Image: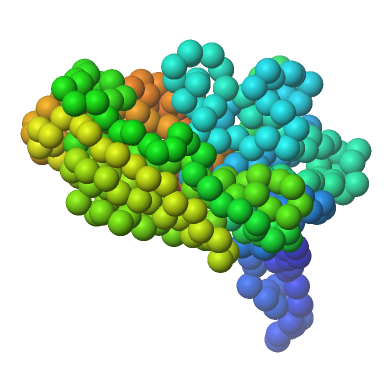
Amino acid sequence: MTRKTGQIHHRLRCRGLGICLLALGSIVSAEPVWAFKIVAPADGATLKSGQTVTARVDLGADTGIVKVRYYWYRDQADTLVQQDDSDASPLAQPDTLADDTYSQQNSITGAPVVAVAALSSGFDQNPPFGGLLNVPKDAVGPMRLLAVAEISRGRLGTHTVFDEVIIEVEPEAALQTIDFETEKPLQLGRSGQSSAFGHVDSMGKIFELPVVGEFADGVVRPLASPASGTTYQSSNPAAIKVLSGGMLQIVGNGKTTLTVANRGKQASLDVNVTVNDEPNEPPVADAGRNRTVKAGTKVKLSGLNSRDAEGEALYYSWSQVRGSKVPLLDVNGPEASFQAPHVSEPRTYRFKLRVTDKKGADSLPAFVDVTVEP
């Protein structure tokens, strides 16, 4: 990356009795201020799963950087707690991606969920603060690469800045089989069952099913997301309706066959739906409007405009899906909050909200972007 600073060219012009006037031969431009940035791999690049690439960053005007850590996340998966690479995590395994499964474990147990850095690099590495980075072997579709730079401020402690790019990952190996990773046939619901904010199958419930593919290289990869190329069909939309993003909704009792297809392969799953036939519309999540705030500001995320057609109370679940991890407070309340962190230039943090009604029906996710400025 090339950056140019303005140069001042002085010329002396003499008039009359030798009086010299100082003129500027060019417009003076201020030195630009720039920030920490991932320069390789580039945003939007297409890489192969398991491929080794060289990660490079431009430190910009951020001084005092002592370490840069790189993390892989599936697109829209929760941003997990960042960890020093010297720490051990019982949840983390080599080549394991951060995914929503760990996030659910965290919300239930309260234990910290940790993301292990795929690469941790300092000034003495080649290139500085970069190096060889492995694309996860089980990656497929859009992936987020998050680079977090730790900046030392001496006695004032440390703070971090980050950059994030979206990478498209495509396995070199051919897909051999695709399948639903669940019991077969799938039984949804038990008539007469009820729950206050429980995860009970009910009319209107929106859910996802795990879909995996085994590839010729022997790696099993998650394929539930349509972003990985998977499509869904229901033989009886009056029982199970296919929604966007690979979501499914219970709309009536009966039997249906769900079919998934990806890369020319198909799999089917027989589903029996026997839920309480009391009508119930799923709630609608509203995470509020996108906004821009200054660093240091206390930011309140509002889900107060979320609604339920039957007017029932709602259970809220907030999570972060873009940006360096921030401490998010009141994640199970209608209004979550966080302190806008230090940034060198505008950076976007994205948050996801899902709400659940008293009968156990979930909403589709809603998202809100908060752009933090210096």
Q: Position of residue 120 (x, y in %)?
A: 78, 35
**x 56%, y 17%: residue:** 112
**In the displayed structure image, the side of residue 258 where residue 170 appears, left or right:** right
Q: Nearer the viewer, residue 88 or 290?
A: 88
User: Which image quadrant for residue 334?
Assistant: top left
What colouring method underlies this structural image? rainbow
Q: Position of residue 157 (x, y in %)?
A: 67, 20
User: Which image quadrant for residue 323?
Assistant: top right
**x 86%, y 39%: residue:** 123
**In the displayed structure image, the side of residue 171 where residue 340 appears, left or right:** left
Q: In this rendering, is residue 61 above or below 92?
A: below
For the N terminus, which image quadrant? bottom right
Can residue 49 be seen at all in this image of the molecule? yes
Q: How many marks?
A: 0
Q: Position of residue 65 (x, y in %)?
A: 75, 35
**x 71%, y 46%: residue:** 219
**In the displayed structure image, the side of residue 99 where residue 242 appears, left or right:** left
Q: Position of residue 234 (x, y in %)?
A: 32, 55
Q: In this rendering, is residue 325 above or below 232?
A: above
Q: Nearer the viewer, residue 148 or 157?
A: 148
Can residue 43 be seen at all in this image of the molecule? no
Q: For the view shown, which residue lies furthest in the bottom direction?
A: 16
